[in-house]
Amino acid sequence: MIERVLLVKNKAGIHARPAALITQVATKFKCEVYIKKEEIAGWMNGKSLLGILSLEVFQGDRVILRCEGEDEREAMKSIARLFGKRFNED
């Protein structure tokens, strides 16, 4: 299991489009993917669009991404890249 704290940099936060990108990438991997806001308890399934949207993540929020399974490193790298690229927004 690996975890990483990611900063949400895009102006609109994680709305439907970024959440869809996260789920699209996460479902490509066999590992389990979980996501949560840093200051709030409760992990959401990173392969669930509604789960991610229910976190209500805004610009400047930090989220913790957890990947568990055989291809966890590749999944972490791919999803973190989305955050780094600001989901191709801004």
Image: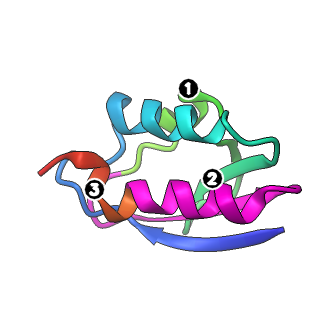
- Image point (60%, 55%), residue name: 36
Secondary structure at badge 2 equals strand
| In the foreground, 66 or 58 | 66
Q: Is residue 51 above or below residue 85?
A: above
Q: Is residue 59 magenta?
A: yes
Q: Please give the residue where the numbered disc 2 appears in the rendered image.
A: 35
- In space, the residues marked 2 and 3 are separated at their CA atoms by 17 Å
Q: Earlier in the sequence, mark 2 or mark 3?
A: 2
Q: Earlier in the sequence, mark 1 or mark 2?
A: 2
- Image point (26%, 63%), residue name: 9
Region of the chain picked out in magenta, as a range: 58-82
Q: Is residue 90 magenta?
A: no
Mark 1 nearby-residue class (10 Å; few <14, some 14–19, many ≥20): some
| In the foreground, 40 or 34 | 34
Mark 3 nearby-residue class (10 Å; few <14, some 14–19, many ≥20): some
Amino acid at circle 1: Leu
> Is the Cβ of the residue at disc 2 closer than 8 Å to that at disc 3?
no
Amino acid at circle 3: Arg
Q: Please give the residue where the numbered disc 3 appears in the rendered image.
A: 86
- Image point (81%, 48%), residue name: 31
Secondary structure at badge 3 equals helix
- In space, the residues marked 1 and 2 are separated at their CA atoms by 12 Å
User: What percent of the width, then of the height, locates residue 60?
Assistant: 29, 67
Name the colouring of the figure.
Answer: rainbow
User: What percent of the width, then of the height, locates residue 6?
Assistant: 47, 69
Q: Is residue 62 above or below residue 41?
A: below
Q: Is residue 27 above or below residue 56?
A: above
Q: Please give the residue where the numbered disc 1 appears in the rendered image.
A: 50
Mark 2 nearby-residue class (10 Å; few <14, some 14–19, many ≥20): many
Q: Earlier in the sequence, mark 1 or mark 3?
A: 1
| Quadrant in which the N terminus is drawn | bottom right
